[in-house]
């Protein structure tokens, strides 16, 4: 645990961590709030799935493109504009009852304007601490990220159950603007300059590790969206309608899931990556998720999801370590953009699949969807071990920037 004490000795590190966590927090809230908001508007989960899928299309385009633009226009400029535009679209969706087609178009815009906070912060991390502390910083960031993906839905459920989905969407927009401003004004964001990538857009996908982490991240995060929807459905009384029927019990269960991830991230996430580490960490989460099918009693779910959650943050730490050690610094923003796109799209697709599964077979259906998505992640991790770097005894350091240099040769 001394690694985290050492991180605190680097100026500005904790401010960056907390500010970016605040700016990214809406990402963990939006899928559940949007699912409930649209379900209440149109009376079915399928319509909500369509809207979430549309948002994921926008995010798929936005992630790597906005990350690429940060190298050309600057991080602060891109983050400022996208934060304001995305928050504005969310407020419109919250207050204006629109036809499904129009709402779908707005959801695409919300996805397109998603602020690229994740690629920005993970790009500047290696410049804030020495190389031997980067793994610890990625681990701490992964633990914090789990508060977004797992605790975010807890906050979403609590707000929507007490005040409704309109207030929930406005709360997410407020987090986006206030947290975004705090992060954008961080001194570290002004001192680290992101160089322009030398290769064309999308060329970073030629690196196997970028494709591997993007695809695994997609299925892994999609499983969380599915299990969260399933837990909410397990403690919802349909006769009370929508989010107002959601019990506080679902929030307790999801909080235990987040707690397990936080503990696992702090205890194990900083350990040096081995080629089999990703598979082992995913398998822990898969075991806890499948155990949820045994019983949907609150305390049983709390225990098994806490234990399963201990593998969650270490998986995200592993993804960051893989990118940080195999991708050139000038291309890391775009690489993290693709990885982030995979995860954000995974949230939307996971929620949509879970919504349809709940309509068909209730909460166990969503849990089975989550388990299936995790199983795919585990199979992919096992099949791609030969491309995962072995970091035993090594520091995380990107490959050197290389290029072609023309040297004139005198004729005489």
Image (cartoon, rainbow, N blue to C red):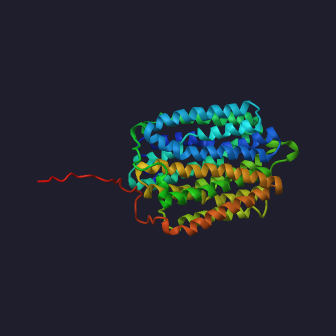
Residue 1 can be seen in this image: no
Is 187 located above or below residue 323 in the figure?
A: above
Q: Quadrant of the C terminus?
A: bottom left
Residue 218 in picture, x, y percent from top left: 61, 55
Residue 65, percent from left and from top: 52, 44
Q: Position of residue 68 (x, y in %)?
A: 48, 44
Q: Position of residue 123 (x, y in %)?
A: 46, 47
Q: Residue at x 49, y 66 (%)?
A: 387
Q: Quadrant of residue 164?
A: top right
Residue under the image location 57 percent in, 35 percent down: 83
Report the front residue among 211 and 243: 211
| Residue in front for this viewpoint, 328 or 25 | 328
Report the residue that reaches farthest toward the front.
411
- Residue at point 40%, 62% (across, down): 394
Q: Is residue 301 left or right of residue 359?
A: left
Residue 121 visible in the displayed image: yes
């Amino acid at each position: 645990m001394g690694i985290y004490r050492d991180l605190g000795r680097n100026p500005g590190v904790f401010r960056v961590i907390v500010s970016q966590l605040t700016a990214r927090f809406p990402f963990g809230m939006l899928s559940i709030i949007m699912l409930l908001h649209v379900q209440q508007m149109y009376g079915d989960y399928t319509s909500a799935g369509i809207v979430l899928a549309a948002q994921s299309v926008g995010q798929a385009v936005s992630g790597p493109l906005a990350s690429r633009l940060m190298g050309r226009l600057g991080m602060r400029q891109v983050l400022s504009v996208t934060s304001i535009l995305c928050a504005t679209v969310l407020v419109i969706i919250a207050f204006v009852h629109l036809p499904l087609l129009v709402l779908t178009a707005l959801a695409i815009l919300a996805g397109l304007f998603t602020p690229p906070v994740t690629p920005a912060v993970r790009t500047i991390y290696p410049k804030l601490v020495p190389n031997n502390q980067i793994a610890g910083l990625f681990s701490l960031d992964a633990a914090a990220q789990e508060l977004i993906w797992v605790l975010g839905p807890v906050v979403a459920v609590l707000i929507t159950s007490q005040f409704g989905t309109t207030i929930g969407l406005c709360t997410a927009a407020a987090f986006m603007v206030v947290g975004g401003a705090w992060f954008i004004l961080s001194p570290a964001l002004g001192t680290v300059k992101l160089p322009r990538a030398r290769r064309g857009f999308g060329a970073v996908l030629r690196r196997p590790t970028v494709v591997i982490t993007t695809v695994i991240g997609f299925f892994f995060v999609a499983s969380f969206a599915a299990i969260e929807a399933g837990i909410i459905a397990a403690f919802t009384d349909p006769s009370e309608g929508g989010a107002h029927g959601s019990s506080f019990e679902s929030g307790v269960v999801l909080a235990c899931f987040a707690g397990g991830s936080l503990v696992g991230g702090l205890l194990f996430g900083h350990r040096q990556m081995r080629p089999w580490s990703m598979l082992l960490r995913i398998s822990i989460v898969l075991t806890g998720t499948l155990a949820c099918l045994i019983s949907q009693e609150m305390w049983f779910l709390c225990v098994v999801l806490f234990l399963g959650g201990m593998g969650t943050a270490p998986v995200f730490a592993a993804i960051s370590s893989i990118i940080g050690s195999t991708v050139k610094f000038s291309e890391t923003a775009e690489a993290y953009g693709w990885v982030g796109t995979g995860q954000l799209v995974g949230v939307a697709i996971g929620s949509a699949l879970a919504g349809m599964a709940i309509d068909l077979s209730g909460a166990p259906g969503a849990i089975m969807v989550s388990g299936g998505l995790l199983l795919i992640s585990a199979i992919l991790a096992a099949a791609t071990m030969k491309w995962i770097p072995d970091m035993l005894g090594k520091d995380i350091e990107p490959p050197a920037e290389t290029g072609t240099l023309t040297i004139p040769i005198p004729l005489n």
